[in-house]
Amino acid sequence: MGRNRLYRRPYADAFDLIPYPAGWRVSDFVKFSGDDNRSTWEYISQYISQLGEAGSSKSLHIGMFSLSLTGTAFSWFSSLAPNSICSWDELEQKFHDHFYSGDNETKLIDLTSVRQGRDESIHEYFKRFKDIKNRCFNLSLSEKDLVDLALAGLHSSYREKLDGSSFYSINQLQVRAFGQEAKFKKEKDTYKSHRSNTHIVEYDFDSSDDEDKEVYATEFVWPASAKLCSCASLKPTQKSTRGDEVYFRCVQVRSYF
């Protein structure tokens, strides 16, 4: 066959001459066929992760990419015109343009509506927030905007403590929130260990005023010989028919945090 009939890679030969990190070995890639349900963005993230140390160089991404493809995806790569790829960013964009499907894409409204659940830990909340953020493929937000969104979704008890501070990244905000979570837990445990008749009551997070509050509910017990006294903040909800027990409704509460 004439030379013009030989297969030629879609990128320059120089990309194959770039040295790999010392001791690095070719990975056993989880391959992309083009017929599965994975998004292209998810796959690219997985591919770079599998490159390990070689993933730090965009130029090295190019030469190994075909080894991570199979089926129709490999056929697509093989059909690219010679020297049509000059950089990893260009190859990645062509890959997305050809295989991208927006079925699993989330929108800005999905990210702004993320709220920490009533019993959801800081770790679980930030993991969920980042998972949704990673599926906003076409959303361009600054790190500051992402921090503001993540902060807004925290329980008000954490948000009030962290609001007003400067955070350069979501990870920095997460670390500070971890610290507040540990501090609150320690304070609760210490308080409860000294007051066995005091219990913490949590409001439903999805309340109409969008504020999650925790209050102390204390059990009052009087002996039969004790003289009763009145309290302006407490009103009886029903008359007692069980001896010395009296039931009250609290009309004023103080937030724990």
Image (spheres, rainbow, N blue to C red):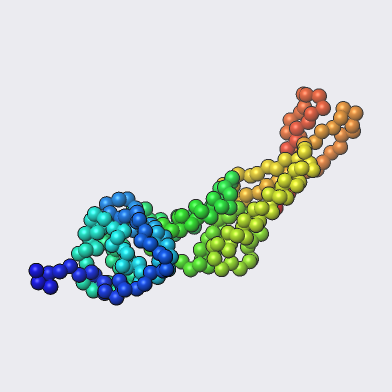
Residue 101 placement (x, y as % from top left):
31, 56
Q: Quadrant location of residue 16?
A: bottom left
> In percent of the image, x 51 and y 63: which residue is there?
146
Residue 29 placement (x, y as % from top left):
35, 56
Residue 227 placement (x, y as % from top left):
90, 33
Instruction: Tell me if 227 is positioned left or right of 118 in this view.
Output: right
> In percent of the image, x 69 and y 54: which residue is there?
183
Task: Please count the marks in the image.
Answer: 0
Residue 66 placement (x, y as % from top left):
28, 62
Closer-to-camera residue (180/23) = 23
Closer-to-camera residue (194/144) = 194
> Is 153 drawn above or below residue 166 in the view shown?
above
Quarter the N terminus occupies: bottom left
Q: Is residue 205 visible?
A: yes
Instruction: Tell me if 170 is positioned left or right of 224 in this view.
Output: left
> Is 240 drawn above or below residue 7 in the view shown?
above
> In percent of the image, x 73 and y 38: which residue is there?
249
- In the rendered image, the residue lying farthest to the left is 1
Q: Is residue 256 visible?
A: no
> In percent of the image, x 46 and y 55: which residue is there?
131
- In the rendered image, the residue lying farthest to the front is 23
> Is 21 drawn above or below residue 67 in the view shown?
below
Q: Quadrant location of residue 43?
A: bottom left
Instruction: Tell me if 77 is positioned left or right of 110 in this view.
Output: left
Closer-to-camera residue (3/209) = 3
